[in-house]
Image (spheres, rainbow, N blue to C red):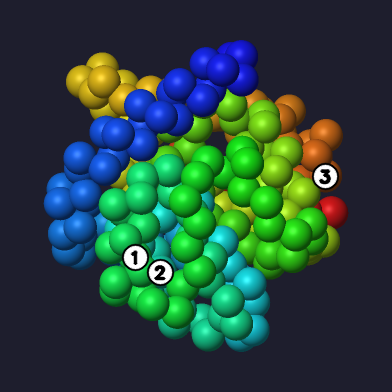
Amino acid sequence: MLPEQAKAVAEHQRRRFNELVDVFDRPQPPGVMARLWQIVASAELRPGAVVLDVGTGTGVLIPLIQSYRPSTVLACDVAEKMLQQVHDKYPLVHTYHGDIISLALASTSVDAIFMNGMYGNIADKPAACRNVARMLRPGGWLAVSHPEGRAFVDQLRETSDLFIESLPTKEEFEALLGPLGLGVIAYRDEPKLYLMLARKN
């Protein structure tokens, strides 16, 4: 996808997700919450860590991340109304409005990056992963996940006007992330949980 096309997709996503704030800002069912806990636990967060939540939405992962006592929680999203909800609920979280492709955090400054429930929405996935790899410290974790699984994402593709692509296979992730210095450590593609965990060399 060309850069101008990716920008157009991101702008469409911004408008649509701003319209969907109330849909996302609701308590999640217990089963979904249990799977979100598994996702956050997979990154082996340690006290004092710097953690980035990409496509945070209204911040469903943030209290789970905060339970591990990180020093800093960062959150970015293309939809400013989503970020306003995060700011109101979690004022200590540093929020960034924009696309992960252009997020300008310092190199090797982040211990763990979560991309939960949003990876399929990224227009330029290679550029996004290059920036993620740049920001991660050696030994840092990248978790790409969806708490409802691949079939849910594919159903959304058929019914939504949002840009959504199917979630990658393990081999696709290895081909994309390997040259960036990220090794796939774990891969789960289950009916109700998708989780790819990679670690920076």
- Name the amino acid, label 3: Gly
Query: Which residue does the image show at 28% across and 63% down from the upper left?
Result: 85
Q: Position of residue 121 (x, y in %)?
A: 43, 32
At label 1, the amino acid type is Val
x and y, in percent, of residue 164 in the image: 39, 25
Residue 45 vs residue 59, the one in the foreground:
59
Q: Position of residue 113 (x, y in %)?
A: 59, 57
Q: For the image shown, how many numbered marks are present on the structure? A: 3
Q: Is residue 8 left or right of residue 81?
A: right
| Residue 48, image quadrant | bottom right
Residue underneath mark 2: 62
Which of pointers 1 and 3 indicates the residue nearer the eye? 1
Q: Position of residue 109 (x, y in %)?
A: 74, 65
Compare marks 1 and 2 and give the one earlier in the sequence.
2
Q: Which residue is mark 3?
A: 181
User: Pointer 1: what residue?
Assistant: 86
Task: Mark 1: give few (<14), some (14-19) or many (20+) Cα within 10 Å.
Answer: many
In depth, the one of 73 and 115 nearer the eye is 73
Q: Hey, which quadrant is residue 112 in on the image? A: bottom right
- C-alpha distance separating marks 2 and 3: 27 Å
**Quick check: marks 1 and 2 in contact, CB under 8 Å?**
yes
What amino acid type should be assigned to the residue bearing mark 2? Ile
**Horizontally, is 43 left or right of 104 in the view?**
left
Quarter of the image with the N terminus in it: top right
Residue 186 visible, this angle: no
Residue drawn at (36%, 75%), measured in percent from left and top?
Answer: 90
